[in-house]
Image (cartoon, rainbow, N blue to C red):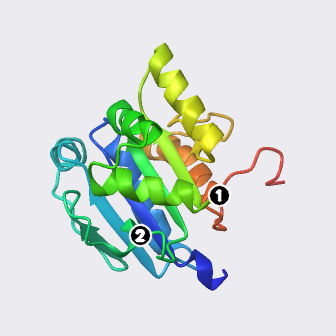
Amino acid sequence: MTSEKNKIILAITGASGAIYAHKLLEKLVSLREPPASVAVIFSDTAMEIWEHEIGSSFQAVPPAKVYKNDSFYAPFASGSSDWYAMIVCPASMGTLGRIASGVSDDLICRAADVMLKEKRKLIIVPRETPYNLIHIRNMETLALAGAVICPATPSFYSNPSTIDDLVMTVVDRIIALAGFESDSFRWMGND
């Protein structure tokens, strides 16, 4: 891994699907070449949802460090920082809409704005269904601005047998989109 890939931001919002963020963090730190830093930001309701869905409170394990969403005193709140990528997982439609509109009213939205303006990787993982026209237009706006929209849609061709297996089909895809190498199922590629 090149040194520029050593700092990742993970924003966890109030959408259901905390398991995706939980497994993503576990996978990031277990990679052969993990990021040196993982900044974690929770939206206002994300921690409550995490505790409800995961069954325990969040415990940051190095290299993860938690930043407060209501503070702009974080290195990645500026374009002069050298953070490589940001993943919003799960992404609520409210957060997705604020990012698409350029409303930088909290650290999550400001960091996403920085990623877009600096032409860095921004991966948005919406966990919502069905989409309405506003959702689709916001996703279009973000895609046109350079973000990658990766819905939390599991795949089944690896024959997953547990919920964790299903979740990992999404997590492995996010890891690949972020530019990290990992051992994961590849259609017609694991022969």
Q: Is residue 161 left or right of residue 180?
A: left
Amino acid type indicated by mark 2 = Ser
Q: Nearer the viewer, residue 103 or 34?
A: 103
Q: Residue at (35%, 35%) from the top-left corner? A: 92
Amino acid type indicated by mark 1 = Ala
Q: Residue at (59%, 46%) from the top-left corner? A: 147
Picture quadrant of residue 126:
top left
Q: Is residue 185 left or right of residue 15?
A: right
In the rendering, at what x and y percent does residue 187 appear? 77, 44
Picture quadrant of residue 149:
top right
Picture quadrant of residue 78:
bottom left
Secondary structure, mark 2, is loop
In the rendering, at what x and y percent does residue 28 appear? 48, 68
Question: Which of the labelled discs sits on residue 14, or is there none?
Answer: none
Distance in Å between CA atoms under marks 2 and 1: 26 Å
Position of 177 relative to 96 (above/below): below
Q: Nearer the viewer, residue 65 or 23?
A: 65
In the rendering, at what x and y percent does residue 27 appear? 48, 64
Image quadrant containing the N terminus = bottom right
Position of 32 relative to 145 (above/below): below
Image quadrant containing the C terminus = bottom right
Residue 159 shows up from this direction: no
Residue 120 shows up from this direction: yes
Q: Nearer the viewer, residue 53 or 116?
A: 116
Secondary structure, mark 1, is helix
Q: Is residue 1 left or right of residue 74?
A: right
Question: Which of the labelled discs sits on residue 78, or is there none?
Answer: 2
Q: Mark 1 — residue?
A: 176
Mark 2 or 1, closer to the camera: 2
Position of 63 relative to 18 (above/below): below
In the rendering, at what x and y percent does residue 176 appear? 65, 58
